[in-house]
Image (cartoon, helix red, strand yellow):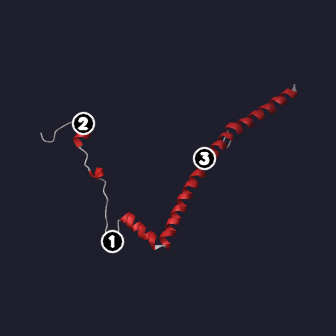
Amino acid sequence: MRRWWVLALLLLAFAALQAKLWWGEGGLGEARELQVRVGEQRSENARLQQRNDALEAEVEDLKSGEAAVEDRARSELGMIKPGETFYRVVDPDATKQPDVDAEAGTGADPAQ
């Protein structure tokens, strides 16, 4: 009879330890969740590292060459050198003003 009590006590202790391992704080479920979060963070870090590398290359390019500064001044600021002529090509479809009444669906005639 005493043997059964010891066996029951050992089984109960084993079950309690297993429950803590599976569902307790720091258990396997939490470990899996942390592994997923670590993977997400690693991919975010890789994306940011690529961005940093691109920005670092751009900074080095701007520091080392006048051509990069000139290119940026031309494209972003619309600057030109003395003696150059600036031409802007405009898409005629992009300059048309939309008909506000037609968009609103009122069908109102502005002449009335």
C-alpha gap between disc 3 and disc 2 = 50 Å
Residue at 29 percent across and 50 percent down: it is 93
Foreground tag (1 vs 2) = 1
Q: Which secondary structure, mark 1?
A: loop
Q: Quadrant of residue 88?
A: bottom left
Q: Going by the image, does 42 lie left or right of 61?
A: right
Between discs 1 and 2, the one toward the N terminus: 1
Extreme residue in the bottom direction? 82
Extreme residue in the left direction? 112
Residue at numbered disc 3: 37
Across and down, in percent, residue 94 comes to: 30, 51
Q: Quadrant of residue 30?
A: top right
Q: Quadrant of residue 33?
A: top right
C-alpha gap between disc 3 and disc 1 = 55 Å
Q: Going by the image, does 105 lie left or right of 60?
A: left
Q: Which secondary structure, mark 2?
A: loop
C-alpha gap between disc 1 and disc 2 = 48 Å
Across and down, in percent, residue 25 comes to: 66, 42
Residue at numbered disc 1: 84
Circles 3 and 1, Cβ within 8 Å, touching? The answer is no
Amino acid tagged 1: Glu
Within-10-Å neighbours for mark 1: few <14, some 14–19, many 20+: few
Q: Is residue 99 above or below residue 86?
A: above
Amino acid tagged 2: Gly
Residue at numbered disc 2: 105
